[in-house]
Amino acid sequence: MKQRPWLFLLPALLLVSISAFIPLMTVMNYSQLTLLPGTQPYFAGLENFVAILQDPAFQGALGRQFLFSFLVLITEIPLGLALALCMPKDGPGVGVSLVLLGIPLLIPWNVVGIIWRVFTRSDIGVLPEVFDWVGVTYNVSQFTGDAWWTVLAMDIWHWTPLVVLICYAGLQAIPEEFYMAAKIDRASPWKTFRYVTLPNLRGVLIIAVLLRLMDSFKIYAEPFVLTGGGPGSATTFLSTYTSRMAIGGFQMGRGAATSLIYFFIVILLSFVVYIIMLNLGQGAGNDS
Amino acid sequence: MLSFPPEWMQWTLPTVLFLGFIAAMLVGLTLWDIKDPGWARQGLLPIDTTRGDRVFMGLLLTGCTFCLWMLFFSQTAVWGVLLVGAVLVAGSISFL
């Protein structure tokens, strides 16, 4: 009878082993081989890892990835929180707001890329037209800055609603008594936010930051459709680099090594951010 | 005809050793915890960590060392990574 929970767990474990463990092990095996189409694989040891880590293109993609994820986090989290605080707490406005916020989240990644591609096309796009009116030259295919902020704006448009929804759910769960107590103590709006709202949102903010961090690190379809990684390699992130290596370059071994390094970086970064946020939250709780 | 391990997975000896090491470590940690249950405590880091947390952090540090070694020294004396990794895991369990 004591073993019954394990029996219930068994189907999930089997599913995880098929969907995650076997592919991961295959990638691990491939990462040590030289695999080229039409040839026999041969053992390369750590050669692929050395080649990838010392490749300036990989280092560039990694740097861009860190910068992109940093910009995404410092923009989307405060913006999402601010929008959640502005949302109505009851009445018909709640439903309308939730539906409006949900629309970008329902659009598939590649469609988002296509929508923004149409927006930014120099012949028919609305953005070049608007910039033209104010006398600014705008071209995502030519200018690095334009490509960067457009990819960033696209991600903010697509994913800030997720942060808003998470924060809104967290705000709804804070008991009204806390705010009444703050009002009785004549706490200012800033102090109420700092010592009541923010500590109570710690859990949901950790989830929002981790989700956005991991998702921004995995961004692929949107910039691929919008800029194709260009101009040059200005918007080539780790995912684009990996797919080019494995599929475009037919170097499955190196692609597998890149995937493992990529996987490791995401785990490491998520763990570090999680620990930092957990610690920050505890500090805030003690202060109050 | 089915074969195990499957041929398409292209199994290599280092992967088998790595997997074996992780599995042995998980079994070892479980047995250690059954015999001498661990508890969350604070070490060098300003957070409470369990034994499993500290092992995980040691493995992450070993992974970082591996990447940095490959970046700066290529495959020169690559066995040094294992030595540094063992020290890092042992150090993490003791001090983090």
Image: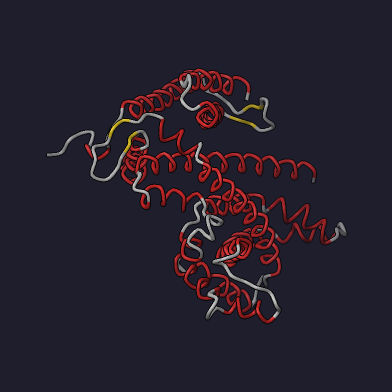
Q: Residue at x 33, y 41 (%)?
A: A17
Position of A137 with respect to A263 (left or right) is right
Q: Quadrant of the C terminus of chain B?
A: top right
How far across and how far down the image is residue A270, in percent? 56, 43
B25 w.r.t. A127: above or below: above
Nearest to the observer: residue A282 or residue A21: A21
Give me the residue at 58% from left, 79% from top: A126
Q: Tell me: A225 left or right of A184.
A: left
Question: Residue A156: which quarter of the image?
Answer: bottom right
Determine whether B28 is above or below A118 in the image: above
Q: Is A110 in front, or is A250?
A: A250
Q: Position of residue A170 (x, y in %)?
A: 63, 58
| Rendered location of residue A206, percent (x, y) | 62, 49
Q: Look at the picture and state if A271 lies above or below B16.
A: below
Residue A33 position, x and y percent, is: 33, 35
Which residue does the image show at 41% across and 30% down from the upper left?
A: A46
- Residue closer to the observer: A44 or A105: A44
Quadrant of the snapshot with the N terminus of chain B:
top left
Q: Does residue A47 appear anywhere in the picture?
A: yes
